[in-house]
Amino acid sequence: DLASMNIMLFGDMENYQDWTVPYFANRTDIPVLWTIPRAGGNVLIRILSKCLGLVQVSGEGSNHYEEQLQIHETPQGTRYVNVDSTTVMGLARAKQLGIAKSGLAEVLYTNLIVPTSSVFSLKNRGRLFSVFRSPLERSVSLYHQAQMLDRQVAEMTMVEYASTRLPNNEMVRTLVGKAVEEDLIEEDLYMAMEFLRRKCVIGLADRIGESIQRIHRYFGWDALRVGGVQQCEQEFLAPNQDRPSLPPPGSEEFNYIMAQNTLDMRLYDYALYLFDYQGGDTRDY
């Protein structure tokens, strides 16, 4: 039982609000989407940005150097604040300009969970949510994506990629702030699990429609789903017909991928449990 272990979160991670604390429309907290690579978060980003029209903090704010926070708009109509939440330098600039207390941002997208925590404070907190996908499926998807982007990977087998390029336990490392050259220990997994247990509204790629409804309800975004918004959402929720086949259990490819995801698999299993656990409670917010 994690709760009985009294695990203390490190650094500024308490700047993320506990998900059990009700979220109000006149909030001072900013919803933060943890964009786990190839986990399905891009569908959510498109819906929040293009269908709901939320003002985002994201990579759109790169190459901006204004001395004050401003809202800009892309030619496609995406509204964003002029700071970059996808790099450490961008987050430092966001903190310096006071993004957390500005009232401009309606959602923030990042994969840098530990550095992003320092942007917030105990008065102006972040509210974490994310979409989780099986590490096996994520790894295969990362491999096929890398094949399209990198000529060297294009010539690699899946085993060669998994043994040389596949990120090692990427989710756990992200939540405990450990670089790839640092060893992970069992306590790191417990820290990551405790963080999810207390701080994250869980969505699942395999149940993306239900996950998006739950996230909408939790953050009060249901009220924005008027006019053509629901039709817009359905266009982005259309099933992906090009899902790659997965290596069978016991195969060399499977074993190499699992070896790189031993802790992430356990964290993902815990996320599955939390999704079911939160199912009733998030309906109340």
Image (spheres, rainbow, N blue to C red):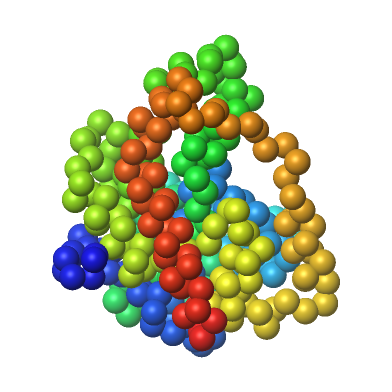
**Taking the image as drawn, is residue 101 in sight?**
no
Residue 20 visible from this viewpoint: yes
The number of numbered badges drawn on the structure is 0
Q: Position of residue 93 (x, y in %)?
A: 39, 56
Residue 271 to residue 253: above or below: below
Q: Position of residue 46 (x, y in %)?
A: 67, 57
Looking at the picture, tell me which residue is in the foreground, 251 or 117. Answer: 251
Q: Residue furthest front?
A: 250
Residue, x 39% and y 44% (percent of image)? 265
Q: Residue at x 58, y 32 (%)?
A: 246
Q: Quadrant of the N terminus?
A: bottom left
Tell me the residue at 58%/53% (across/down): 205
- Residue 71 position, x and y percent, is 60, 66
Asked if 153 appears above or below 131 in the picture, the reply is: above
Residue lying at the far top of the rendered structure: 155
**Residue 107 drawn above or below residue 269:** below
* Image quadrant in which you'd find residue 53: bottom right
Q: Is residue 101 above or below residue 152?
A: below
Q: Nearer the viewer, residue 51 or 121?
A: 51
